[in-house]
Every structure is written in C-alpha cells, then in structure tokens.
Amino acid sequence: MAATVVLVHGGFLGPWSWRDVVVALARAGVRSVPVELPSGMGGSGAAGDLHDDADRVREVLDEVPGPVVLCGHSYGGAVISEAAAGPHPRVRRLVYVAAAVPDVGESVADLAPVAPSAGVAEAVRVRADGLLELTAESAREALFHDVAPERAAEAIGLLRPNNPATGTQAVRGAAWREVPMTFVRGAADRMPELVSSGVRWGDVESVVVPGGHCPQWSRPGMVGELLAESAGCPGR
C-alpha cells in the first residue's frame, strides 16, 4: 500500500507552497495532505506556536488511513520532529526539505550559526500585533532567487505573518531518532543549514537537488518524484 504524503510548510509560507508538488504526486498516484499550521494563521495576533503546529500535524496523522511519509520544509522540520515523536505509528519515513532538524530541548534559533557570514539572514519586521513579516526583498534574495521573476513575485504575494515564538521554542520530541529520515538539500540554498549535532549522518538518506531554499517551489516535479519514491510509487 502506497503511503500518504503529509506536507508541512515552513515559516511565512503556507500550504500553497506545496501546490505543484501535490499535482506531481497526484500524477504519480500518490495521495497528499498539505497541513495549515496555526502559527501562520493569526491575522489578528492570535497565531499558534510551535507546539500548536505539532499538535495540528499530529491530528492529521491520526486522521490519515494507512502509512504516512511526513515531509517538512524549513521551520516545518521542527514541527514534524515533534509531531511524529513517540514514534507516531503511521509515520514510516520523515523527509526534511531544506529543513531544521532540532533535537529534544533545542529550538530552531539554537541551531543558527554564530558567524553572520554563514548563509543569508532573513530580514523581518515586527507588526503592530507582534507577528513577524518577511520583507519582500529578503524573500526574493533568500527564498526565491532561483525562479523566474514572475514566479518569485507570486510566492512573495502569498507570504503570511508568523508567530515569533516558533523560532525560540524547544521541541519536545525528536522523531528522527526513531523513524528513518531523508534530508534534502538545495544545491544553491542561501540559508544556513539548521541541523542538530546529534544527527547521525551515516543513518540518513541525503539527497541534493538543484535550486535554493524552496525546491518545492522551484523544482516541484523533482521533489514530487522523490516523495513518490518514498511513498512507494516510483517511476509512475
């Protein structure tokens, strides 16, 4: 039985960022479920935090019949690490797409490099309601530099505010210690890699794809193919 692919977006993004991957998976005969994270839904300042995000993903895992490949992008890596801890009985593989991989007690901020020259920093501004917004210039430079201007502009127009707490909260579980893991790097990723020192790379399937920090947006067919293979439907 092919697994369902559950897709978890990164900070400032949304389920829209998986749009074309969902299409690619459908063509391969693979069911997918993009998750809406509460941390990016607080238009009035009532956004959820990291633990709310993990709880929401866990709810989806409980509802999906059969096995699951759980995929997180960027900040979404922290979310899936906590959500699938236990491990969750339906999750048979974790896929981290240019994603944070914190250990228990670590936050995304804890994994950030000390040297300012390591990667490109995201420029944000604080809204009146306390949520953070990613500037258009920073998004274009850090996230969407590897796509056509029109496609970058589309993504930038869909960015959403985010709860700043998500970057400093420590995860309560590290599912990657219990479940097989694939780590996907973008060959032209300008963001620093946020991976715990506890990750045992000899046990990790590592894949390098062309493009930057958002290969699900710049190379959706390639990401879809990779996820279809993880789900048990290769070459369809």
Image (cartoon, grey):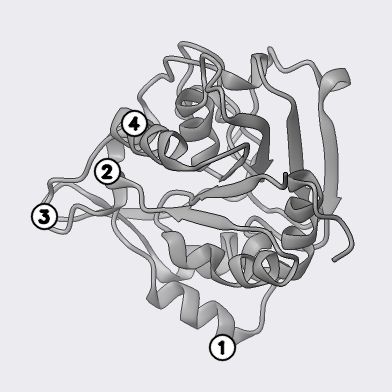
SS type, badge 2: loop
Q: Which residue is drawn at 84% across and 37% down?
A: 206
Q: What quarter of the picture does the N terminus occupy?
A: top right
The residue identified by callout 3 is: 128
Q: Mark 2 points at which residue?
A: 163
Spot the residue most to the bottom.
150
Q: Which of marks 1 and 3 is nearer the N terminus?
A: 3
Say which residue appears at 28% left-offset and 35% top-offset: 49
Neighbour tally class for label 3: few under 14, some 14-19, many 20 plus, Cα within 10 Å: few
Residues packed near mark 2 inside 10 Å, few (<14), some (14 to 19) or many (20 plus): many
Could you say whether the residue bearing mark 3 is in a helix, strand or loop?
loop
Q: Do the residues labelled 4 and 2 touch (CB within 8 Å)?
A: no
What's the CA distance linking mark 4 and mark 1?
Answer: 35 Å
Please tell me which residue lies in front, 35 or 207.
35
Q: Residue at x 48, y 15 (%)?
A: 173
**Left or right of 2 on screen, residue 102:** left
> Mark 4 against mark 1, which lies toward the viewer?
4
> SS for tag 4?
helix
Looking at this view, is 56 or 38 the one in front?
56
* Alpha carbon separation for disc pair 2 and 3: 12 Å
Gap between marks 1 and 2 measured at Cα: 28 Å
**Which residue lies under the disc numbered 1?**
150
Disc number lying in front (4 or 3) = 4
**Residue at 11% of width from left, 51% of height from top?**
129
